[in-house]
Amino acid sequence: MALRPIICIPDNRLRLVSAPVERVDDEIKRLMDDMLETMYDAPGIGLAAIQIAIPKRVVVIDTAKEGEDARPICFVNPEIVWSSEEKRVYQEGCLSIPEYYEDVERPSRVKARYLDREGRENELEADGLLATALQHEIDHLNGVLFIDHLSRLKRERVWKKFEKIARRSANEPGHPAHDSREL
Ligand code: ZN
């Protein structure tokens, strides 16, 4: 397993629509292992492959709390097939937008269809944090970020802030501090 660098806005690769995976082979399994290691190290509770600059429809999530046993779930080609009318607001963050958190409203329950780590077809009904994480990560596969669910003003403000940080760090050795949690 290997840690992979996480890309952040304003990196436009985060806007790519990721391609479906044709077969869950050893390469995809290695990718999932690297994604889990990178996510736990960050630390975060979800990661989409495009966040490590791989435009494939692969997501890993583990919503276990600190002190609980790890509960990693790997999703290949995940698709939301049902979502509840009922909504829920959760303060979201993103490993690709470090240290920025905002309330986002999404359906409180969703059903997803996907291939699991062994390439088997699977379905999962999620609520709570898992439902939020799944929707957040599937958005990534479509080039959508959680800030796209905010007002244009807020989105432009955070994007500009990160452009400024990127310009500054291009002139300095090392990278900006990266100690956020989340997705
Ligand atoms: Zn994210």
Image (cartoon, rainbow, N blue to C red):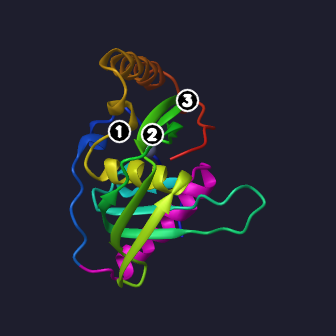
Q: Nearer the viewer, mark 1 or mark 3?
A: 1
Of the 4 image quadrants, the one containing the N terminus is bottom right
Residue type at tag 3: Pro
Q: Quadrant of residue 134?
A: bottom left
Element marked by disc 2: loop
Q: Cβ–Cβ below 8 Å for labels 1 and 3?
A: no
Prevalent SS, magenta region: helix
Magenta highlight on residue 25: yes
First to last magenta residue range: 23-45
User: On the image, numbered disc 3 is attached to which residue?
Assistant: 176
Residue at coordinates 52% horizontally, 28% vertically from top-left? Answer: 100
Of the two numbered discs 1 and 3 on the same chain, state the one appearing first in sequence.
1
Residues under labels 2 and 3: Cα distance?
Answer: 12 Å
In front here: 154 or 167?
154
User: On the image, numbered disc 1 is attached to which residue?
Assistant: 145
Q: How busy is the neighbourhood of tag 1: few (under 14 within 10 Å), some, or many (20 plus)?
A: many
Residues under labels 2 and 1: Cα distance?
Answer: 9 Å
Residue type at tag 1: Leu
User: On the image, numbered disc 2 is attached to which residue?
Assistant: 96
